[in-house]
Image (cartoon, rainbow, N blue to C red):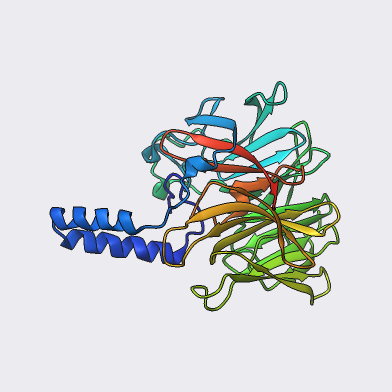
Amino acid sequence: MRFKRNTFISMVPALFVLICLIAVSGLAASPASAQQHNQQRQANAPAAQPEWQAPGATMAALKFGPGADQVGCVDEKTALYDFISPTSVFYKNGALFILDAPNFRLNKYTAKAPGKPFTFDSAIKLYKKPASDPAETAAENAPAAPLFTDLAVLDNGTIFVASSREKLIYRYDASGALTGKISPRIKLDGITRIWADSEKKLLIEDPFAGKIFVINHAGELIYELDLNFQPVLLPSGETVRVEYPETPDSSREINVKIFKIPAKFESASIKAVFHMPVQNFIALGSDASGSSLYAYVVLGPFNDAPAEAWFVSIDLSSGAVTAKTPAPISPEMSCMRYVRMTGVEGSFIFARSNEDEYLVTKHSLVASR
C-alpha cells in the first residue's frame, strides 16, 4: 500500500466517510447548485483556525528528492516501498533527526547558532538496495526491503530505528555506527511506534495486534499491555492511556489513565475538560517531576473538519489545562511520530508535508491565564 504525501498511517474514519459523502453528493449536483451550496457552507461555517495562524518557528524546510539536503520522493510514481515522505522526526541534544524512509536513511540536522536554520549535518544509510533493483521498479513488484517507521534517541546519542517489515530494532551509537539489531522475542505483526526509556527498556507499539510491548535490550519481553495507545513513559515508569467519551458529540471530557509497569493495574485516573469535543489527543511526555502531562490536542465537532489544535500541559492531579499554545491543525495526525517534545519542557516540534516541501516547526507553551 502506498501513502500519498501528508497522509499518515492512522486516519480519522469519520473524516474519511465525510469526504466520501461530499464526493458522492458533488457528482450529483449541477455546477450552479454546487457553487451555491459551497457559498452557503462557507458563510455558515465556524471560524476555523488556518494552519498559518500557528506557524511556529521554522527549523527545516526541505525539498523532495534523494539529494543530501532533500528528503522523500519528488513523484509518487518513483517511490518505492510504501512511503513518499519521511516517516518520523525526533529532536535530541540540539539536533533534529528525520527518518527518510523512502531513501532508506536517517538524516541529522544541526543549527550553527541558536535561532539559525537547521542544515544537513550527516546521514546514516539504513539499507542499500541490491544492484539488481531497477530504480523504476513499481512498489507492488519490488522485493521486500525494510520499511523504517519510527526512531528514538537517548541522551547519550544512542539511536534506535524501527523496521516494521523486518520486525527489528536497529541500534546505532552516537557516531552513527550500527552496533546491533534487536529482534523482539515476541510475535509481532508490525511496528508503528517505539519509545526508548533507556538502553535497557524499549516500548513497541504493534497496532495490528492492539498491544504495547515492553522489551529489554536483548529483545526479551518485560511486560505487555493489552491496549493500543501512545507509548509514553512518565518519570515514575508509568505509562499513559487516553479514553474518549462514548458520546463524543455531547461531551468535551476525556479520561487520562495512568498504568504502572510492570504491575498490571491502573494507578490513577483524571478527567480533562476542553471547550470543544476532542477529536485527537496525543500524549507526548511529561515534566521532570511527572506532575504535568504534555499533549497535542485537536478539537472540533465530530464527523466534521477540526476547528483548532493546541499544544497543552495538563495537571495530572486535577486534569486542569495549565498552559497551551496554538498548534498547526492536522486531522490525519493520529501518530506521535510527527509531533514530539524537544527535551525542553513546554517545547515541541511538528512535521508536515505538502506537495512542495517537508516542513518542521518548533512551538512553545504559554501559561494559561
- Residue farthest along the top direction in this orientation: 112
Residue 177 in view here:
yes
Number of marks in the image? 0
Q: Quadrant of the N terminus?
A: bottom left
| Image-based side of 78 in relation to 109, left or right | left
Q: Horizontal and vertical percent for residue 258? A: 76, 69
Nearest the viewer among 354 and 186 is: 354
Looking at the picture, does residue 186 appear above or below residue 191? below
Q: Is residue 181 left or right of residue 156?
A: left
Q: Is residue 226 above or below residue 139?
A: below
- Residue 104 in view in this figure: no
Q: Quadrant of the rendered structure where residue 108 is?
A: top right
Residue 142, position in %: x, y? 44, 46
Residue 349 is situated, as x and y percent measured from the top left of the image, at 64, 42
Residue that protrudes farthest toward the front in the picture: 369
Q: Nearer the viewer, residue 95 or 301?
A: 301
Quarter of the image where one finds residue 350: top right
Would you place residue 149 above or below residue 281 in this image?
Answer: above
> Viewer-proximal residue, 291 or 142?
291
Q: Residue at x 24, y 63 (%)?
A: 24
In the image, residue 218 lies at what x, y percent? 81, 55
User: Which quarter of the figure has residue 209?
Assistant: bottom right
For the point 71% across and 33% down, the residue is: 95
Identify which residue is drawn at 72% across, 25% down. 114
